Image: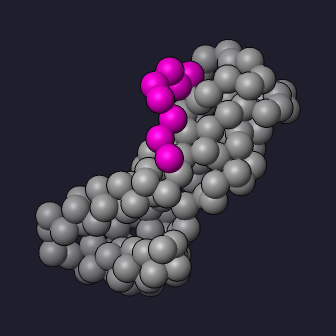
Amino acid sequence: MADVDIGEMVKAHYRSGTYIGKVIADKGDRYVVEVLAVKKHPMQGDLHNPHQTEGVFFHERKALAFGEKTNVKKAAVHRFTETVPDYADSLKQAVEEYKQKLSQEDSAYNQAALTCLNRLEKAYY
């Protein structure tokens, strides 16, 4: 965890996704982060039973939207000193990277996650 100031750019991990954004408030044990780009798309499926498809509710998880504000635990926030990418480009890249990772192995989980991602892509673009 890094102590950051209001207005600083950060990389923040939130609900299995990673985002680049700006800290807009300090709420004690959390920062309020305004999303500016997507670094890693959220995992699909049941986070409490990762990589399982049977006997679980398989969640479809969208990435946080541009400008969306979210409360992130301070331990999951780190300074970001690189150039902030365009939101749409970063989302497209994050989706493609996740799809490539899922395509490396043919499993029930990967197929279900790819199905979710394909639906989300249609909604995103």
Residue 2 vs residue 57, the one in the foreground: 2
113 vs 41: above or below: below
Quarter of the figure with the N terminus: top right
Queried whether the magenta region covers residue 60, the answer comes back as no
Queried whether the magenta region covers residue 82, the answer comes back as yes
Q: State the residue at coordinates (62%, 27%).
A: 9
91 vs 25: above or below: below
Quadrant of the rendered image containing residue 13: top right
61 vs 122: above or below: above
Residue 1 vs residue 121, the one in the foreground: 121
Q: State the residue at coordinates (62%, 38%).
A: 21
- Percent x, y of residue 92: 40, 60
Query: Which residues, given as a range, are shown in magenta?
Result: 79-86
Q: How is the image coloured?
A: one colour
Q: State the residue at coordinates (59%, 29%).
A: 10
The number of callouts visible is 0
- Percent x, y of residue 22: 68, 34
Horizontal arrangement in the rendering, residue 111 relative to residue 66 (left or right): left
Quadrant of the rendered image containing residue 77: top right
Q: State the residue at coordinates (43%, 75%).
A: 121
Residue 45 appears anywhere in the view: no
Main secondary structure type of the part rendered in magenta:
loop
Residue 3 vs residue 45, the one in the foreground: 3
Residue 6 appears anywhere in the view: yes
